[in-house]
Amino acid sequence: MSRIAFVISMYDELDTVRRTIGSLRDVGPIVVVQSDPHRADLLLSPDAEIQWLLMPDLAPSVEAYEAVRSTGSPSDIPARALCRNFSAGMARVSSEDIDFVVTILGDVYVSSLTGIKKIVERMQAGGFSVAGTRALGQVFFDANGLLTREQGTETTDIMPQFFVLDAALLAQGYFTSLQVTNRFTTEQCLGDEVLRYCGEHGLGFADCCLWLANMPYPHDIAGITYNPDKAEPRGIRRLVRWARRHVLPARLPTLPAHTVSRES
């Protein structure tokens, strides 16, 4: 059986993270990287069975961050914080005797390994190093803060809420020091790291990455529950699936870009 580690980047999602840890205690190494929520009651208490890293909050204050987001302007805090937290977590587990690393945000609940095991089997069968989801039909911010990064079938942007890595990548130095290649879009930063690996090994992106879904928050991965506040309502989900099936590869209607919360 494959040995699996978990890296969790969180902010103040204490209850969800605790539930996930409770489900995974006997699975493998768990590293939780928390951005300081500025409240002692929201800190994850040290636990002998997990590794907990506390990082400074990159926002000057909660109020300042929310004020920027309320205007619709892009913020560079999520991408900077996530690249930092993911890098710290990956570096910590890179020395462990593991085969795969599952990475999630704090608002994603993992109740079992059922779906994850199936993903790992598909990765092994196809020789994939990365598995994740994409957001077809959406538009992300480019490096200039403009909404121009259309998410089509050729996208290499990977959603940060849940993705799986072959641990061999970490052993070679990938994902342990992520570069912020787009300070407004974490998804591009993750995809660019995969592109770096592919370029240095003479591979195409499709050779490395297994797409699990064309929507950012799929509902059919057993044992994975996304934040219900971000998941698409059932009716909207059906409409988006129809559009992806019948409109692509033609241009999809522009949908609002999902944003990564500051929690991570």
Image (cartoon, grey):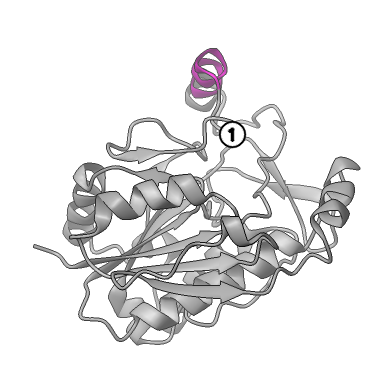
Q: Is residue 142 left or right of residue 258?
A: right
User: Residue at coordinates 30% horizontally, 86% vertically from top-left?
Assistant: 95
Question: Which residue was labeled with disc 1?
Answer: 230
Task: Measuring from the top left, give residue 15's x and y in whole percent.
Answer: 47, 45
Dominant secondary structure of the residues highlighted in magenta in the image: helix
Residue 245, percent from left and from top: 47, 24
Image side of residue 204 versus residue 222, left or right: right
- Along the line of sight, which residue is nearer the eye, 155 or 224? 224
> Residue 101 or 24: which is nearer the viewer?
24
In which quadrant is the N terminus drawn?
A: bottom left
Task: Give the magenta-colored segment's residue range.
Answer: 233-241
Report the quarter where the C terminus lies: bottom right
Res. 187 image quadrant:
bottom right
Residue closest to the eye, 171 or 226? 226
Residue type highlighted by circle 1:
Lys
Residue depicted at x 59% and y 53%: 12
Q: Secondary structure at mark 1?
A: loop
| Closer to the camera in the image, 255 or 201 | 255
Label count reads 1
Which residue lies at the image location 82% right of the left edge and 48% below the top edge? 66
133 over 127 or under it: above or below: above
Seen as rendered, the residue at the extreme front is: 41
Queried whether the magenta region covers residue 169, the answer comes back as: no
Q: Is residue 198 visible?
A: no
Q: Is residue 27 something one can see in this rendering?
A: yes
View extreme (left): residue? 1
Dot 1 crowding, Cα within 10 Å, few <14, some 14–19, many 20+: some
The spot of residue 151 in percent (x, y) is 62, 44
Q: Residue furthest top?
A: 235
173 in relation to 209, above or below: below
In the image, residue 74 lies at what x, y percent?
82, 53
